[in-house]
Amino acid sequence: MSRDAPDYTLLSDVEIVGTEIMVAMDLQGATIAMPIDVQGATIAMPIDVQGATIALPVDIQGQTINLDVNLVASEVTIDVNISAQTVDVKIYTPSGRWVTASELLTGSTYVYGTSIAAGDEVELVSLSGRGRIKQIGFYFERAGTGTDAYNDIHLRIYIDGESSPSVDVRAAEVDRLNGYVAMTNIIYGINQVTYGTDEYVTVVQSSSPGGAVTSLRWDSGDAEAQFVGGYIRPEAEFTSSASIRVYNAGSVGAYAYIVVIYGEYL
């Protein structure tokens, strides 16, 4: 059933029981009232609305339904009553990207003191469902000379089962989000204290909302960081899962500590 309705008012009451139906509608310059009551049916209903005012109440019970709506220069009210269904609703912008609302629940988790052998990648946190990784606080410490906590330890985020990480950063990259302040302090002897022979510690006040290295202990004899601490705010969206891992590119072991703040969608 198709309706081509230019420049007039269309009233369409559709009641469909125990059938399979495809309804295609191209509405231009019309005012439409279209209540639909569907029971026991499989429905595919693409609707293309241009320059129209439309009220579309939909009452769906015990159905599998695919509702594609393309709205151009229209005023649309869609009332949907869904019972005993699993429904995934996405709203796309004109660029093709889909829009999500803010998370409704916020959770946190932490892992302290996990040993990461040289050349190994270890999963520290696994999240399932739909959500967003908001912030990760980290602290990396080398087990001995041969691993630089600032340059050799990678924080990685894998989204929705991907084989390559969406985020792969070292403390060196995170420091640059804050203007390279921590390493600049070490290089030029600014805001640092001597800690043992040829070792210096700096503490940084962060000004970057995206992330920063906030503490760094540097061994100038080895030209390596003993430890480094900081945070990033990746705002990484995931629809089914997220995996947060640490990779050690150094030649000796290291220890990783992280805290994760995340949002969940209902």
Image (tube, rainbow, N blue to C red):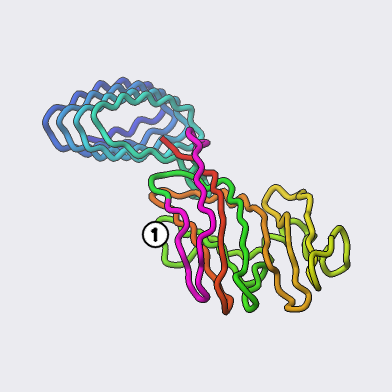
Indicate whether residue 103 is drawn in magenta: yes
Please state the horizontal and vertical placement of residue 110, each as a whole percent of the image: 52, 49
Q: Quadrant of the N terminus?
A: top left
Closer to us: 158 or 245: 245
Going by the picture, which residue comes out furthest to the front? 196
Q: Which residue is mark 1?
A: 161
The residue drawn where x is 15% and y is 30% is 40
* Drawn side of residue 162 relative to residue 63, left or right: right
The residue drawn where x is 48% and y is 27% is 75
The residue drawn where x is 70% and y is 55% is 212
Q: Note whether 138 is above or below 50 in the view shown.
A: below
Indicate whether residue 15 is drawn in magenta: no
Identify the magenta region. 101-126
Q: Note whether 105 is above or below 150 in the view shown.
A: above
Q: Note whether 142 is above or below 157 in the view shown.
A: below
Q: Note whether 105 is above or below 169 in the view shown.
A: above
Please state the horizontal and vertical placement of residue 41, each as a whole percent of the image: 16, 33
* Drawn side of residue 60 relative to residue 80, left or right: left
Q: Quadrant of the C terminus?
A: top left
Please state the horizontal and vertical placement of residue 19, each as a whole percent of the image: 12, 34
Q: Give residue 162's quadrant in the image.
A: bottom left
